[in-house]
Image (cartoon, coloured by chain):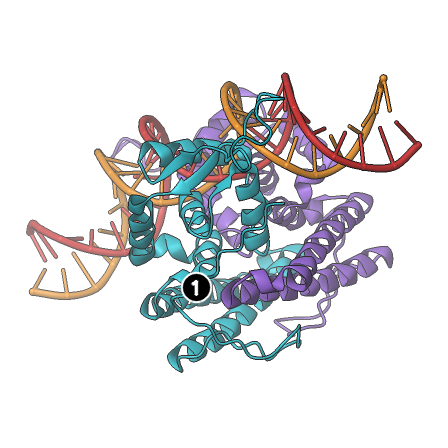
Chain colours: A purple, B cyan, C red, D orange
Amino acid sequence: MLEFAILGLLQESPMHGYELRKELTAKLGAIRAAISYGSLYPTLRRLQAAGWITEAAETPVTAEEVPALTSRRGRVVYKITAEGKERFGQLIAQAGPETYDDTGFGVHFAFFARTDQATRLRILEGRRRKIEERREGLRDVLGRAAERLDAYTLELQRHGLDACEREVRWLEELIANERSGRAPTVPNIGTAGGRREDNSPPPPGETRNERP
Amino acid sequence: MLEFAILGLLQESPMHGYELRKELTAKLGAIRAAISYGSLYPTLRRLQAAGWITEAAETPVTAEEVPALTSRRGRVVYKITAEGKERFGQLIAQAGPETYDDTGFGVHFAFFARTDQATRLRILEGRRRKIEERREGLRDVLGRAAERLDAYTLELQRHGLDACEREVRWLEELIANERSGRAPTVPNIGTAGGRREDNSPPPPGETRNERP
DNA sequence: CGTGCGATGTATCGGTCCGATACATCGCGG
DNA sequence: CCGCGATGTATCGGACCGATACATCGCACG
């Protein structure tokens, strides 16, 4: 999971660890709290050992400016390699059953802009199936085993069931949109300007690179 | 987390591992898939080493019936000790910040019937605060950083934000109910009979014990 | 002028939990 | 009588988290 997310992010621009964590937190804020350095740094090392990312020397800001006043410590900048991009492609193409659990699905979804439409559809349908199964399980418990459980446990199940039904509906919409070839509809709150409809293989000049 | 759930379940009746997993899955189905034996068995051993649970010999079905025909293998039945019950009480009382993340909250909530009202209220409010923070984070991203993110990532955040708002409302209701001294309202779908209002320290004759 | 504090930044360690795997028994239907 | 799905116990490697340590930078406040 982390491996996938890192490879995905580094395709947008090179970054160092701290920055990576921030971007990751922003992009995945909806599904997980904040990834830990205790997994981030070891994973970076693993990816580097596999040749999927490399350390790029921190650019000393237009060459000889700020020469060595304070010894320029730290700041290891990572960038993705060609092999890394290939690996990312593989990870997308695989999209096995583990892609359908909460975290796995969320992470893959966050990188749908780099995923081809057929795979997007496959993942959305796999996820829907999984949620439908969970929903049926909850209905069973609420129906058959209701009297065995206390009121709080039942309330928890009811809330969970509600969330399942909601997510299935959400997925249905997304699937319908995919089939009709449109990008995810943004008819909601009109935040900022008009209807950008950039779609699957994203406009490649999308780098974003603000370093003061 | 697992430790807490096991101690909670074993207070209802002694069980062996497999049974424990099934009950756990039923009770926590709304929040996590199914706990793994790879964590269940080691945890059981840990709890046993700490003296919080003990192995109870499998009852050979009315003494000398079925004597040794097939060597009576396996089936290690665990039961909670007095120290274990005390430990469970401590774990409830602590209810630190880790109690407010998704899994931690869910597990604690599932055992609210064994939790005093003051603690219930504290946990619900802590959880609400945490979700409100997540909600604000998502609003920020959707507001400030919207143009930096692709349409899919934004859609994910929007869905997450919706879930947050929904959960806050749910928590508000539960908190209001707690304050008014009522059990969780079940005004919803009229599954089965009338208004049972068993509350906090649950009617102790609640064992449930169907072994054929 | 300094001093302390919050953000930036890299890194490790112990522990929890998962997923895959192995293996054995039981009861039932084909 | 044979296989298959449910019941049942158990281990191993790996992913990830939470706490912790430590160092630098810029700025606000006294």
Residue B89 position within the rendered picture, expressed as x and y whole percent measured from the top left: 31, 54
In which quadrant of the rendered view does residue A184 lie? bottom right
B128 to A182, vertically: above or below? below
Residue A172 position within the rendered picture, expressed as x and y whole percent measured from the top left: 78, 61
Front residue of B165 and B19: B19
Q: Quadrant of the C terminus of chain B?
A: top right
Residue B67 position within the rendered picture, expressed as x and y whole percent measured from the top left: 57, 25
Identify the residue at the far front of this view: B64
Work out whether residue A31 can be spotted. no
Residue displayed at 57% across by 34% down: A3
Front residue of A7 and B194: B194
Work out whether residue A35 can be spotted. yes
B166 to A157, vertically: above or below? below
Residue displayed at 75% across by 46% down: A123
Quick check: C6 left or right of A101?
left
Residue receiving disc 1: B113
Q: Secondary structure at mark 1?
A: helix
Q: Residues within 10 Å of mark 1 (few under 14, many from 20)?
A: many
In which quadrant of the rendered view does residue A85 lie? top right
Front residue of B66 and B11: B66
Q: What is the tally of numbered marks visible in this picture? A: 1
Residue displayed at 37% across by 63% down: B115
Front residue of A191 and B124: B124
Residue A91 position within the rendered picture, expressed as x and y whole percent measured from the top left: 68, 33
Quick check: A101 left or right of B208?
right
Residue displayed at 72% across by 52% down: A133
Identify the residue at the far bottom of this view: B180
Chain letter of the residue carrying label 1: B
Q: Amino acid at mark 1?
A: Ala
